[in-house]
Amino acid sequence: MSRTGRLASILLAAAPLVAGSPPAFAADPAATLPRTVLVRVVDRLDRPVAGVTACLLPACGKLATRAEGEGFRIVLPAKANEGGTTRLRLQAPGFAPAEAEVPAEGAAGLVVRLKATGSVTVSFLSLDEKREDSLVVALAPGPGVGAIRPGKPIAERKLTLPPRPKGTKAVFDDVPAGTWALSWNGPSVASGRKAVTVAALPVDAGTPPLRRGISVEGAVRDDLGSPVAGARVLLSERAAFDQGDPYFDDVRSADDGGFVIAGAPAGEPLSWTVRSTGHMAASGILGGESRLEVVVERAQHVSGRLVDPDGLPFREAQIVVRYVTDRSSRNHALKIEIADDGGFSFHREMPSKTRVEIRAKGYRQATRALEPLTDTGWPKELSLGEIRLERGRTIRGRVVDGNSGLALAGVAMKTTVMRRDGRSIVLDEQEAVSVEDGGFEVSGIAPKEPVALSARKDGYAPRNLDLGEADDDVEVVLGRGGRVEGRLCGRPFELSRSEIWMTSQPNVNSRKGAQKPDATGRFVFTGVETGSMTFTRAWVYENPLMPGAYGAMVGGTTATIVVEEGRTSTIALGCDGIRLSGILLREGTPLAGKAVTFNGPGGTEPDAMTDDSGGFSLFVPVPGPYEPFTGDYPPAGMKWAPVACNVPAGGLDGCILDLRPVPAQEKP
């Protein structure tokens, strides 16, 4: 029999003939096959919607789905192709259901936009009891990853605010779940923003307070009187660490050097900064004026050339320029590029003392210190000449498991050379990773300097070692560390705003690895490095409109214990001492929701947070006078009355402190 005959026999055997009917294989197979359709469901921002289910109308039989790209593929039963139009119902949590017609076979996939059930309502009151105000209110998605500003507004509402006390509302519908930015501005109203978190239900954003606003106009010129185009003019207000969203705006100067910033708060002292490539940065305080004329001095041009120990051009380095003052330091704003011949250059942004640091893996950090510029007569060009990198000291070692003694690979090793003369300054950092036999080698370390060596690996407690000049070969033993169980005492709203920070270095605070206490104040740290550890309560505020940015205030609610390998230690923060309670006011008005540190005898700094009535309650370590400090209070020209709470040995309840203007006779 031929191959064709054998195949026919198999088919016939699988589907025997029935008398009076045609052979089963004679029908069109495509007419009985199910069909698949690619579906993409999005919200009003064209973002994929999660948790979508689909059903076939009219009975709404649920359909199987298979994820594919940013959508999913559904399988339609064969009977769905009969009788003309096929319709689907699509629904997802937080969205209203929608119906859609399945496109004809061979057409492109189906895209369905769902309407969110979330909404935002916000109310506004005019600034005046006798006249109207106009306002434009916008709603925009919060900043994405890496962004510092909200996205493009999805909707705007133009409002006319009647004289007080009447109010006006703006309503935004179809708002998907997430963090959103409400913003507002008007001809005589200061620009403002507020973060709003939306779920699947309507949200009332309340009545944000409005402030009078002005437009600030001005111009930027250089020291020769020529206009400076493209300068960045930044205007902002100084704010406490926990202020929701302080005023901030920036613009670029036009070709003639002119600029306009609308919506600045009227009557408020504002900080201004102007930066322009090739010019020194300029800054100052705007005390309510509506005109700002800025002169930026042409900057000193600094250049140099990097070479390796053999004198060949070197490019694989990072150049960090830091401008150092008595109180702080700031890094150069722009990345400094290195040319193929090792050459680099930058324009000095500030006349202060300047450090040029060249960092390269395996080489010592090279540093050039530039003295502060004189008021006049300094050179416009400065050459650092040829900077030759040196290999420096090498530290070798091996990392092992403390229990088994086996070698550990993949351990992140880091050496840090620091100088501590009033504040800690990192002079150099080098990194390496241990290999299969646990060995590691870190090169490029400055000789004759104390070196801190750290080892980090998931599943193990960190290990930090201080190495001397002769410690070039070390063994690092990693263990699982200890466990610390703690309790933070305080009122519920205080606990919700607190974090517990841990550090092994005295007088150093770090948020890395911070833990939040639960509703009862309990917290746990696991895998803690052995040795002396200090735990500190920090008051933390995170602005949802500035991802990654946060403000923190740290007082003296601390505890120090010695952590042992494999053992559990317990601590308590803010639970013991002499009780002090009272109220903080500003000219008779409660200072609500303020983190406050009390400066007391012997440098003690116990802290607490005020409630809605300005009330505070805490324990202090010893009797004596305790003066409050809230991060931004007392401001210039004001003082507490009385100056402090005088706490006796038996404690003090009901201490009332009012922040008032300094009497004229006491002013200098």
Image (cartoon, rainbow, N blue to C red):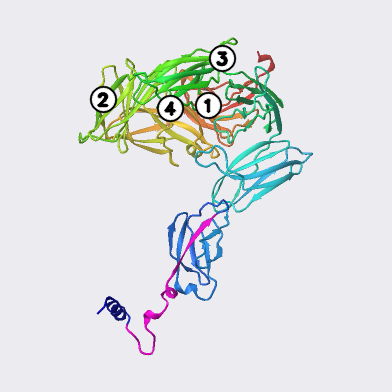
Does label 3 or label 1 sit earlier along the sequence?
A: 1
Name which residue type carries label 2. Answer: Arg
Name which residue type carries label 4. Answer: Asn
Does label 3 or label 2 sit earlier along the sequence?
A: 3
Q: Which residue is mark 2?
A: 396
Looking at the image, which is closer to me, 140 or 83? 83
Report if residue 20 lies within the magenta region. yes
Mark 3 vs mark 2, CA separation in Å: 45 Å
Q: Which residue is mark 3?
A: 380
Mark 2 vs mark 4, CA separation in Å: 30 Å
Dot 1 falls on a residue whose secondary structure is: loop
Q: Can you give x and y, in whole percent of width and height, for residue 43 in the image? A: 55, 54
Dot 3 falls on a residue whose secondary structure is: loop
Does label 2 or label 1 sit earlier along the sequence?
A: 1
| Mark toward the viewer: 2 or 4 | 2
Dot 2 falls on a residue whose secondary structure is: strand
Q: Which residue is mark 4?
A: 509
Q: Residue furthest left?
A: 405
Does label 4 or label 1 sit earlier along the sequence?
A: 1
Does label 4 or label 3 sit earlier along the sequence?
A: 3
Mark 4 vs mark 3, CA separation in Å: 41 Å
Q: Residue furthest front?
A: 2
Does label 2 or label 4 sit earlier along the sequence?
A: 2
Task: Judge the density around disc 3: few (<14), some (14-19), many (≥20) Cα neighbours within 10 Å.
Answer: few
Q: Is residue 435 above or below residue 295?
A: below
Looking at the image, which is closer to me, 454 or 586? 454
Q: Which residues are magenta?
A: 16-42
Q: Residue at x 60, y 33 (%)?
A: 246
Q: Which residue is mark 1?
A: 333
Q: Is residue 280 above or below residue 32?
A: above
Q: Quadrant of residue 614?
A: top right
